[in-house]
Image: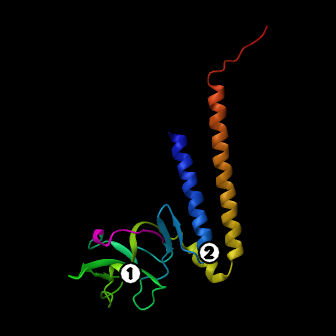
Amino acid sequence: MKRWSSLCLSVFIILLFCSLLLMFYGVSTNVFGYRFLVVISGSMEPEIPVGTLVAVKPVSPGSIREGDVITFRDHDNPEVLVTHRVVGLTDNGYFVTKGDANEAADPVPVSAGDLVGKNFFRLPYIGYLAIIFKRSGAVFLGTVVVILALIGGASSVIKRIKYSKIKQLEGPVRRLEIR
């Protein structure tokens, strides 16, 4: 059981690094149905600081409740994604949202069509890697770091698999001494 959980953790780390690599190139990535995005403004601080990697999963608009943190397309600029908290629901099915650090609610309620998904988990400050590499133009360096991490993770997984097979083979064998 311990080996299985270690293997799952290694695979998750490898997928996370692959996601980060794609984000270095400006691609928002989907892994197991989750879309990974980086928070680049302070509107949700202190709960979601700048540089947080958020995992967003598409959900039915009917499942969204007051207090949920959602990601949606900006009404004025659909290319821009916004992550804010739902502070109310309108009678016609729109979401009233507000950044935790903002004084007032967002001026335009969010329609179900603009909903990208609900935030399921966050990794604070992990997204800073993508921000730093994008802004500094150090995409090559970021690629090298991620590739080295992938190689290290893959070699770790391979060693664990080999070790478990050797242990299985050694189990029933007894050492014989010839005199």
Give the alpha-carbon distance from disc 2 to disc 1, as whole Å. 25 Å
Instruction: Look at mark 2 in the image and give the residue it sits on.
Output: 24
Instruction: Look at mark 1 in the image and give the residue it sits on.
Output: 114
* Quarter-of-image position of residue 86: bottom left
| Nearer-N-terminus badge (2/1) | 2
The magenta-colored residue range is: 53-63
Q: Residue at x 58, y 52 (%)?
A: 10
- Name the residue furthest right: 179
Residue 61 falls inside the magenta stretch: yes
Residue 131 falls inside the magenta stretch: no
Q: Which disc is residue 37 wearing?
A: none
Foreground residue among 73 and 98? 73
Q: Is residue 60 above or below residue 80?
A: above
* Quarter-of-image position of residue 43: bottom left
Coordinates of residue 1 in the picture (x, y in percent)? 50, 39
Q: Residues within 10 Å of mark 2 (few under 14, many from 20)?
A: many
Q: Is residue 166 above or below residue 111?
A: above
Coordinates of residue 119 in the picture (x, y in percent)? 40, 69
Colouring scheme applied when the structure was drawn: rainbow
- Element under label 2? helix
Q: Is residue 179 above or below residue 120?
A: above
